[in-house]
Amino acid sequence: MTGIRLAVPERAQKGDVIELKALIQHPMESGFRRGSRGEVIPRNIITRFECFYNQELVFASDFNPAIAANPILTFYTRATETGELEFRWTDQNGESWSDRKSITVT
Amino acid sequence: MRIAALCGLAVMLGACTPSAGTDGAPSELSPSDLQSGYAFLTPETQQLQDDPFENPGYLWVDRGARLFQVSEAAASPSCAACHAEGLNGAASRYPAIEPGSKRLINLEGRINQCRTEHQELEPLAYESEDLLALTAYVANQSHGAPYGAPPSADLQPYIEAGRSYFETRRGLMNLSCRQCHTETWGKALRGDTISQGHGNGFPAYRFEWQSLGSLHRRFRDCDMGVRAEPLPYGDDTYVALELYLATRGAGLEIETPGVRR
Amino acid sequence: MSETFGLDRRQFIAGSGGAILIASTPLLALADQEDVDRARSELFGDRPVQEGRVTVKLPPIAENGHSVPMTVSVESPMTSEDYVRRVAVFSPRNPLPNIAQFQFTPRSGKAEVATRIRMSGTQPIQAVAEMSDGSLWSGSMETVVTLAACVVL
């Protein structure tokens, strides 16, 4: 049960640049920390984020261990047509999580 | 490095000079001085707590909201089955004395009691993601409600037990909670400003933890910070300390999920 | 304070300063500007980088290096003829010089992104933007990362 929070305006006017926010629960374990017995805590990070607007990529991001735990992104897209925005995160092992929000463009 | 840094802490607070007393310093917080830990954050961190989308604590509140609706077994009603109208204001009444066992329990204890007595479920482990989530969700329903159980004669012995823990010097640094959080709040200690040590934002998202955590986790960190043996999660003395803090901070509002350093 | 612990304010501050010096000793090998330059040429080759058009925004003081809010924006019309292709963000003082890479498209509408980053100490964070014409632009900002009082392992 990975927590995902998305902020997408429900409606927008055609041509408007709209703000999108995406937050996911993930430790982003850097691989540089040690546990209480001195053992290295293995790296476990999300490496890729993508946002698709009706299946077309509008924004993406590659993460390194310097992205804070529970990563949040605020970015933008131009409202072009009514449809669906898909947000997808993929970790270093290829596991991925995604969620969608619909938008009405008038 | 850390031991050296903490020795700095001890030197600054005078713990390395056994003759230094605390006479003359205020032993109680004056009600007009009450300030939530929020007041000691940078504007950017305050903004993060205030933003109901970006505050990462809401990841746990969301999870708690989902768990609240779930029936985990056929014979087990969901939390919502009994508390359909929600639990607005409930967090203000905890810690409280549980009528059956006559024990002092906090919100975490109350949630686990519901599980064992009304839902035929195993209690959740303290500090587990699910117990943090449910606690954060329930406490968040009292966001803005008064922090602190109303005083009552029954609670007095527990308040005194909590106060005694708060005021007792302990650990290699020989420091009490009171020396930092009542007598020295507002002063700079390395990069931090010492807060008044209130629990009104908990469970809170701490940058240091990179996660949400309970007030007992915070107590354990403070105890380890002064190099004292921390008590186990859910320990009766920590619950009493939680109650003492709630009376000491009466007048503040519940901020769960708070964001702290 | 002076009555309480027999220390005056000046001694209190001096004590704090000592603690900060001791505590800022790095725990592991950290990147430096050479690492940033190398990481940059791995991503963009040895094309010239001009200063400007890129703004990095950080708070004046970050109270904890685990989570520092950062906004990067690039001046661009963001049309299909003229847009920002990608922005890479670098650290000269973290264990790794690469922080993140952001990929924009003409449909991004605006070349701006905000996230929260880890910073192991006070340092200038540097961003390099690659435009659709292949030109490279850069900007940077420094922030002070303070150290927590009670560090618990």
Image: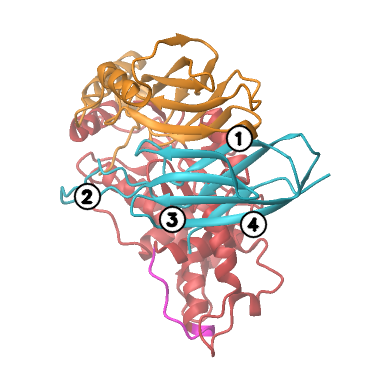
Residue shown at 59%/27% (left/top)?
A: C111
Q: CA distance from mark 3 to mark 2?
A: 20 Å
Per the image, the residue denoted by label 3 is B214
Q: Residues within 10 Å of mark 2 (few under 14, many from 20)?
A: few
Q: CA distance from mark 3 to mark 1?
A: 27 Å
The lab-note entry on whether marks 1 and 2 share a chain reads no
**Which comes before the other along the chain, label 4 or label 3?**
4
Letter of the chain that mark 1 sits on in the rendering:
B
Q: Residues within 10 Å of mark 1 (few under 14, many from 20)?
A: few
Which chain did the image draw in orange? C
Task: Give the amino acid type for the residue marked by disc 2 in the picture.
Answer: Gly
Q: CA distance from mark 1 to mark 2?
A: 43 Å
Which chain did the image draw in cyan? A
In the rendered image, residue B38, in percent from the top left (x then y), is placed at: 54, 37
Q: Quadrant of residue C47?
A: top left
Please say whether residue C76 is one of the residues in the magenta stretch: no
Letter of the chain that mark 3 sits on in the rendering:
B
Per the image, the residue denoted by label 2 is A35
* Residue stretch in magenta: B117-126
For this view, does C9 lie left or right of residue C71?
left
Per the image, the residue denoted by label 4 is B142
In the rendered image, residue B99, in percent from the top left (x then y), is placed at: 53, 78
Q: Nearer the viewer, mark 2 or mark 4?
A: 2
Mark identifier at residue B32: 1
